[in-house]
Amino acid sequence: MSMGAGLPVDPNSPAPGIVHLGLGAFFRAFGCVYVADAMAASGGDWGVIGVSLRSPATRDALRPRNWAYTSVTLAPGQESFRDITVLNSVLVAPEDPQRVLDAMADPATRIVSLTVTEKGYCHDPASGLLNMAHPDILHDLSHVVPTSALGYLLRGLQMRRAAGRPPFTVLTCDNLPENGKLLRRLVLQLAAEIDPELERWIAAEGRFPSTMVDRITPATTAADITRISEKLGYPEAAPVLHEPFSQWAIEDDFVGGLRPDFAAAGAEMVADVTAHEHMKLRMLNGVHSALAYTGYLAGHETIAATVADPVFAAYAKRLWADITPAVAAPEGVSLAQYADALFARFANPAIHHRTWQIAMDGSQKLPQRLLGTLRDTLDNGRDVRALSLAVAAWMRYAGGMDEAGQPIDVRDPLADKLRDLSRRATSPAETVSAFLSVNEVFPEDLAERLHAPLTTAMSRLSALGTRGAVKEATS
Ligand code: CS2
């Protein structure tokens, strides 16, 4: 670190080996830390070229320190700082798309990783197929310069094939089930439309390992930046805040076996990550979403505040008891212990993870977080009251009005549609029917089976208020 005017600037960025699409707080709090540890343990040129697909804000905040930033670990009652210097540079795709493609095609790049959130996959969450009517996909089908992450992957791979280079490994780090398989399918679907030869080459040579990623990373606020800069004694414009816990399970399937020594950094290299992914999506993210909708409606600002309320703490535990029979434990894992650990992580008072943040993009999250569990629970003839209440709370939330009649700032690609559906309905049964007709989210057969339990849950929300309904569904 050199100290230019009191500001520690990273003097020499590491040589790149990875291009990362979607440089949000999560990847900087997670993937970058693993890469830094892997390089410290075993070397290799694995510096990360970060790509922002939309806004220049992250690039602009990182530039003064030459891409170094502070990772802040928030343990209860204690925060610790670590400087992360693994970024080689940051590109803003809309400003210079060709530079992004050139970086992807560069022989030094062996991995392109992604955190673009669920909606960034431009797919239909219920079927897992590419949404051919998505504006970004329509654009990318008719232009060589892409806008979507899928389009970038495809054009980057196309350039490599044209140059006679092997493909890069595509490493998805988003919370989707069998995320590597899903992404491979989507990229191949897009390739088939553009260049069937390329499709065959990617199918044969490409590698898309699935991964399970886990670290709670709330959005950094302006108040965080001020407080952390004061503690550090210099302006830190791009800190990331996260819990101490971190888990990464990665399928060990990389082009030419080329990758950082992730295992030395604590990642689990496995043959098949499905069991880890299902456990995490259903137990962590499913209950996170359930607490986000019910907690928000009941007036709780954060997840920690929600589970500090005994009614919601009991609800979370009830949900884990109901979800556990619908989860096959990865080898050597006790689901009961996993649930206990999740409760402690959610309760961490140092983490201000807003219910509103987790509530975002519900239409893209519900299928893998709650609906699969609901289907399995119905199949097994078990009680679906507590799980149904979570989905009904989402419907109530997405309707756009809280219990006090105040508008909710709903962020969701389907927000307008969901609000309109909700406004036209005049009874709980009608509201439920209207939402269940959204087949991007609810497959038809499941919608039919969910109608009765969701109508009951919706009626109880109206009759008792959210907190009352949560209490009743837990008893
Ligand atoms: C959260 C996740 O925002 C959300 O939807 O459920 O981001 C969650 O914090 C992470 O998956 C934890 O690994």
Image (cartoon, grey):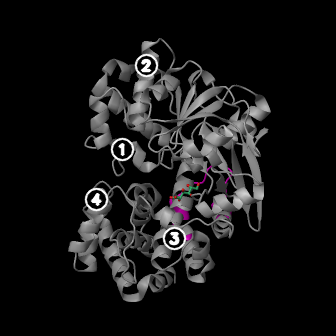
Residue range highlighted in magenta? 321-337
Horizontal and vertical percent position of residue 305: 60, 75
Q: Residues within 10 Å of mark 4 (few under 14, many from 20)?
A: few
Residue positioned 71% across, 56% down in the render: 229
Residue positioned 32% across, 61% down in the render: 415
Q: Residues within 10 Å of mark 3 (few under 14, many from 20)?
A: many
Asked if the residues shown at circle 1 and circle 3 are in contact, with their CB atoms under 8 angstroms apart, the answer is no
Marked residue nearer the N-terminal end (2 or 4): 2
Mark 3: secondary structure: helix
Measured in 3D between alpha carbons, the distance from the residue under mark 2 to the one under mark 1, in whole angstroms, is: 22 Å
Of the 4 image quadrants, the one containing the N terminus is top right
Measured in 3D between alpha carbons, the distance from the residue under mark 1 to the one under mark 3, in whole angstroms, is: 26 Å
Asked if the residues shown at circle 3 and circle 2 are in contact, with their CB atoms under 8 angstroms apart, the answer is no
Q: Residues within 10 Å of mark 1 (few under 14, many from 20)?
A: many
Measured in 3D between alpha carbons, the distance from the residue under mark 3 to the one under mark 2, in whole angstroms, is: 45 Å
Measured in 3D between alpha carbons, the distance from the residue under mark 4 to the one under mark 1, in whole angstroms, is: 23 Å
Amino acid marked by disc 2 = Met
Vertical placement of residue 347 versus 282, above or below: below
Q: Left of 255 or right of it: where is 399?
A: left
User: Residue 158 sits in which quadrant?
Assistant: top left
**Label 2 sits on residue:** 159
Horizontal and vertical percent position of residue 243: 68, 58
Measured in 3D between alpha carbons, the distance from the residue under mark 3 to the one under mark 4, in whole angstroms, is: 26 Å
Residue 338 seen in this snapshot: no
The answer to which of 422 and 5 lies nearer the viewer is 5
Amino acid marked by disc 4 = Asp
**Label 1 sits on residue:** 122
Q: Is residue 333 magenta?
A: yes
Measured in 3D between alpha carbons, the distance from the residue under mark 2 to the one under mark 4, in whole angstroms, is: 43 Å
Residue found at the very far top of the displayed protein: 164
Amino acid marked by disc 1 = Cys
Which mark identifies residue 291? 3
